[in-house]
Amino acid sequence: MKSYGDWKRRKSLLISFAYIVIGILWVTLGDAWVGHRLLSSKEYWLYQEIKGVIFVCLSGIAVYFCAKYVREQKSFTKSLSRLDLLQTNFEVSSLADQLNSSVSILRPENDRFSIVYVNHGFTRLTGYDAEEALGKELPFLKGKNTSPAALERYEEALRAEEIATIELLYYRRDGTPFWNELKINPVYDADHELLFFIVLQNDITKRKCAERRLQESEQRYKSLFAHNPDMVCSLDMNGVIKSANPAVEKFTGYGVDEVIDQSCWDFISDRDRNKAKVFFEKVYEGNPQHGEYQMYHKSGDLIDIEAVVIPIIIDGEVSGTFTIAKDVTEQKKTQELLGKAEKLNVVGELAAGIAHEIRNPLTSLKGFVQLLRPNLSEKKAYTDVMLSELDRIEQIVTELLLLAKPKPALFEEKNLKQLLEHVRTLLNTKAIMSNTEIVLHYQCDIDYILCEENQLKQVLINLLKNAIEAMPDGGEILIRADKIDHKHVQISIIDEGQGIPEEHLPKLGEPFYTTKEQGTGLGLMISWKIIKEHGGEMVFESEENKGTTVQITLPVNPKVSDEKSGNYQITS
């Protein structure tokens, strides 16, 4: 190409030089010849005009042939350049045929880009041989599922004559689809005019399938994360929350935006924080952990959380943790209720045995007192009290049997003030022996309530005995009756005793739970049961070394539900 260019430049110079020499000779020799041959001025001027016309015509002919020559030389040069490049590409075609990639050469022709060369890799990729592909446009491989938008990007890349990489779904000759990665490379001549495109094609079906599986995996992960009913959070090594699913708001009351970039230790209760840190340290060592701890709800309440903490391992190093937690507050309450129910079952069986053992000597005592009563007429008051107390013991024994097998209780209208005074009288002797005074303040204008008298007495006696035992140094116990509204009364028993520690208050009433050395915990349990069956409520308020207040709220006329009506008889 270099020698041809030098020859072309030398030839252009020679043609220009020859044209100048001929023009000079024409002018000088022509004038000299005319001067010898033509003598009249008229003939001379006619000659000059003819000479000028002839010169213009010859110059126009020379310019036309020069322009044509230049155009032909330019076209020839372009063709030669294209042939030279094609020759170079075909010289390496044997190497291209050894490539796994498909190599195609597209030549622009008017408004289309037709295939002028394909290697064997094209045949391996598409199933079409060279004869079937030559002269066609590359999109002849398209099918009904080929993206029109991707085809448009391919056409735009060709029209823009730019380097581009495009992924298209194409079809082989046998109809099987494959993902084709096209790398389009335009080739220009020395004058920067487009000669052709070299297109490299590769089957990327496996990669696309892998990408699709990865996308599906990510979508499954996002679905598992976002729609998981349990709370899921990811934390860094410092315990800072980096992501959380919407369930966090259901459990803690905090929105996702409120917990992101916050320390998880701010949400764990003070009591469990150190335990949780030890728990997480084991996870940082690469060991998944399962445990329970308490967290703060946005409302300030504590909730019980059961959590599984899994290490996030990247390149063999723990970079954070995943925490999957669920609220087990209600579950723990249910377990506690089941525990209480199990204890009640044991208590029922125990109570049945004790009641039967007590009834035998109780029957004998009651019988002998009745036999001796006529002979002790002067001590009639004592025998009456003895018989009354024996009846109450028998009633208590019957109540113990109720724990094993409930029976219908008889609700009757009773004078509340008389009932309270009777209970005070029964325990007054014990109170005096303990240097304690029982004071009754009745400030209620409700005289009668519907109740089971013996059961209600049993509750009040249990509470007063506890109050007396809580005041070893003596003091005052106040029984106060107040009207809350026209449907409810409140009985308060207030002592000045040692009080109950705050952490023990929630456990009062559980079977076998007691703060007394010789207690069994059954008294409060039965009392709670009786008040509940009366449709009432019993609340304890206490402060250590200052005393305890027990408030019993009772309906004046309790409504017995249908599910309990079989165990109650109400009379007026």
Image: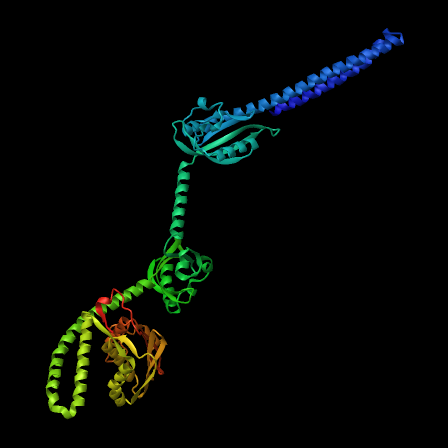
Percent position of residue 374, x then y? 11, 89
At 40% from the left and 27% from the top, the residue drawn is 173
| The C terminus: image quadrant | bottom left
Q: In the rendered image, which quarter is residue 286 located in? A: bottom left
Tell whether 420 sits left or right of 36.
Answer: left
- Relative to 273, is 176 above or below? above
At 58% from the left and 24% from the top, the residue drawn is 81
- Relative to 127, is 541 above or below? below
| The N terminus: image quadrant | top right
At 81% from the left and 11% from the top, the residue drawn is 50
Q: Nearer the viewer, residue 465 or 178?
A: 465
Residue sitting farthest toward the front? 572
Percent position of residue 522, x then y? 23, 75
- Relative to 416, is 7 above or below? above
**Total numbered badges shown on the rendered structure:** 0
In this rendering, does residue 100 appear at all? no
In this rendering, does residue 456 appear at all? yes
